[in-house]
Image (spheres, grey):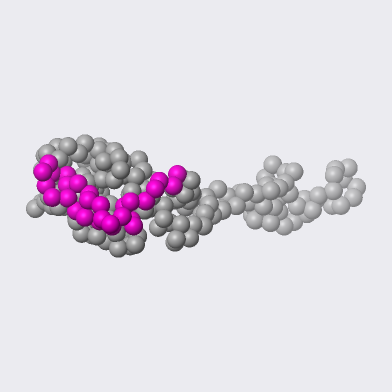
Amino acid sequence: MSLVIPSAQSGGPGLAVTEEVFGREFNESLVHQLVVSYLAGARSGTKAQKTRSEVRGGGAKPWKQKGSGRARAGTTRGPLWRTGGVTFAAKPRNYEQKLNKKMYRAAMRSIFSELLRQGRLVVSDDLSLAEPKTKALTDKLTGIGFHSGLIVTEGLDINLFLSARNIPNVYVSEARSLSPVELVHSEKVVVTTAALKAIEESLS
């Protein structure tokens, strides 16, 4: 059984797609897990402190062991000293969370199915530009009632990408590098026919 994704142009022909990809029930917990995993993978985790062995210096014993009246000390880089290292030093860590391919594809199918049910997913091939010009793209987007959201193309369309840079809340992405966070947060998602076919093939 097939579904039809409506055209962004009023009265334009829609595009038939399989129910296997675009007719799934919304799995909120799985989508949440995908979004959390995606955001966690984007964290840099660069916080770092030095232990006593990593602080420069401190090789010489500051004073003799006995007779000075001061506490015994073998280095000036111990954690109790002002110039010393940190007892439990923070180290760079990896925040990445594992999500296997089967779960990823199921979550993406769930997202696209929900976008289609809510009327937030449309198809359009009338967004190509002869030159990078923001006004030309703005006029085209206004004509299809698109004010904010995500535009998905099959490959890198440099003219479209450059034209969209100065438009607030409008983003352009390739089908192969879609962000689940952008899909979930987008008011509307406009996909080209070629990109939609590529998405359908990758999620089948």
The stretch drawn in magenta includes residue 128: no
Number of labels in the image equals 0
Measured along the vertical axis of the image, is residue 153 above or below residue 141? below
Point out the residue furthest to the left here: 130
* Pick the front one: 198 or 134: 198
* Residue 147 point in image, percent of width and height: 21, 36
Q: Quadrant of the C terminus?
A: bottom left
Examine the rendering and report whether any part of residue 61 can be seen: yes
User: Residue at 56% of width from left, 53% of height from top?
Assistant: 92
Examine the rendering and report whether any part of residue 134 can be seen: no
The answer to whether 79 appears left or right of 19 in the picture is right
The answer to whether 17 appears left or right of 89 in the picture is left
The magenta segment is 1-28
* Residue 45 point in image, percent of width and height: 52, 50
The answer to whether 71 appears left or right of 109 in the picture is right
* Residue 127 point in image, percent of width and height: 14, 49
Q: Quadrant of the N terminus?
A: bottom left
User: Residue at 21% of width from left, 40% of height from top?
Assistant: 166
* Pick the front one: 190 or 174: 190
Point out the residue furthest to the front here: 1
The stretch drawn in magenta includes residue 22: yes
* Residue 69 point in image, percent of width and height: 88, 42
User: Residue at 20% of width from left, 39% of height from top?
Assistant: 146
* Pick the front one: 44 or 19: 19
